[in-house]
Amino acid sequence: MVKLAWLNGVYLAADEARVSPFDRGFLFADGVYEVTAVYNGQLIDLDLHLDRLERSLRELGFPAAPDRGELAAVHRRLIVDNDIREGYIYLQVTRGAYGARDFAAPALVRPTCFAFAEAKPLIDTLAAREGLKVITTPDIRWARRDIKSTGLLAQALAKTYARNAGVDDAWMVGADGFVTEGASANAWIVNPDGDIVTRELSSTILAGVTRARLAVALAEAGLRLQQRSFTLEEAVAAREAFSTSATTLVAPVIQIDGLPVGNGRPGPVTRRLQGLYYSAIGADPGRAAPWLFQES
Ligand code: PLP
């Protein structure tokens, strides 16, 4: 099936979309993006993603953001025309092409806006069922990780490092020994006291939409969350660990740097939070994720 994409207001076959090599997204990674999950044909937390997109653009000094209503309509049309039940919509906005390579950004911005859809299971995946193995790597990224920039080289290298090491993901660790986040996910632990811990928001990490939604869901269930930094040592000694992102939702982490987390299998708190999150996005955990209720 031909995949339908959207580029600067025009719907077209994804492999026919073309942008200029002078686009500042290509030359300088001068752009931002969002990935919004789709479950049961519905967008998950699109408003929060568009809020974050607008914030990222503001922080990069874009004079305006693309029209929010139009972006929402594009998301919905890409779901329908690509027949997406479960998957995601990718949206990227760059500062556009100006026919010259000038480090200084133009005052008048003609952005390049691109979106495409991908069908992909989100809930019933090997990662969600069996958990992820991660290794750790120094966090070599820039200092504004709160901006969802397309400058993803450090994360791409971290993920490649993990893949080449035969594991699923890399957790990045700052020079101070504290875990920042996964290559494309927020990092969480359940410590030996049973506290659920994830790093506090700051410019050192991305404010994940899945993180935010899970924080609300767990508070509604009467669970408490500690938002604070944790060290790699704490992560390795944790009872459970997991990561959150729009495309992996809540994924257990069962191994860090070759050492099992807890008993090396997804733990009961992680299973409970997976269930809470799936319910929050309108899934019936019993049907969508029956393995949640099996003994691990
Ligand atoms: N942290 C980083 C570095 C990411 O790239 C992502 C997602 O791409 C996340 C966290 C999770 O964010 P979200 O839950 O909004 O997908």
Image: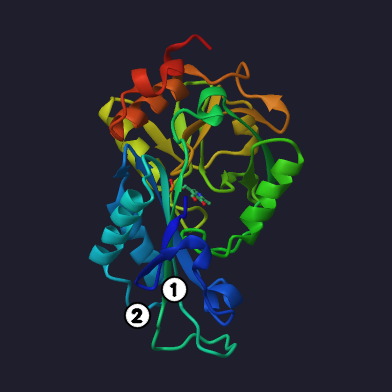
Q: Nearer the viewer, residue 232 or 209?
A: 209
Count all numbered tags in the image, as a single digit: 2
Q: Residue at the spot x=31%, y=35% of the render?
A: 281
Q: Nearer the viewer, residue 219 or 99?
A: 99
Q: Which residue is mark 1?
A: 60
In this picture, is 98 found above or below 26?
A: below
Image disc number at residue 63: 2
Residue 11 sits in which quadrant? bottom left
Q: Is residue 177 left or right of residue 166?
A: left
Q: Residue at the spot x=41%, y=88% of the render?
A: 107
Image disc number at residue 37: none
Secondary structure of the residue carrying tag 2 is loop
Are the residues at dot 1 and dot 2 in contact (C-beta closer than 8 Å)? no
Q: Nearer the viewer, residue 54 or 123?
A: 123
**Residue lying farthest to the top in this orientation:** 295
The reply to whether residue 74 is visible in this rendering is yes
**Residue lying farthest to the front in this orientation:** 1
Q: Three-letter amino acid code at disc 1?
A: Leu
Q: Is residue 54 left or right of residue 207?
A: left
Q: Is mark 2 within 8 Å of ligand 1?
A: no
Q: Is residue 140 left or right of residue 206?
A: right
**Rendering coords of residue 204 (x, y %):** 52, 55
Secondary structure of the residue carrying tag 1 is loop
Query: Badge 1 local density, few (<14 within 10 Å), some, or many (20+)?
Result: some
Q: Three-letter amino acid code at disc 2?
A: Pro
**Rendering coords of residue 105 (x, y %):** 49, 85
In this picture, is 293 found above or below 229?
A: above
Query: Badge 2 local density, few (<14 within 10 Å), some, or many (20+)?
Result: few
Question: How far apart are the alpha carbons under marks 1 and 2?
Answer: 9 Å
**Rendering coords of residue 42 (x, y %):** 29, 43
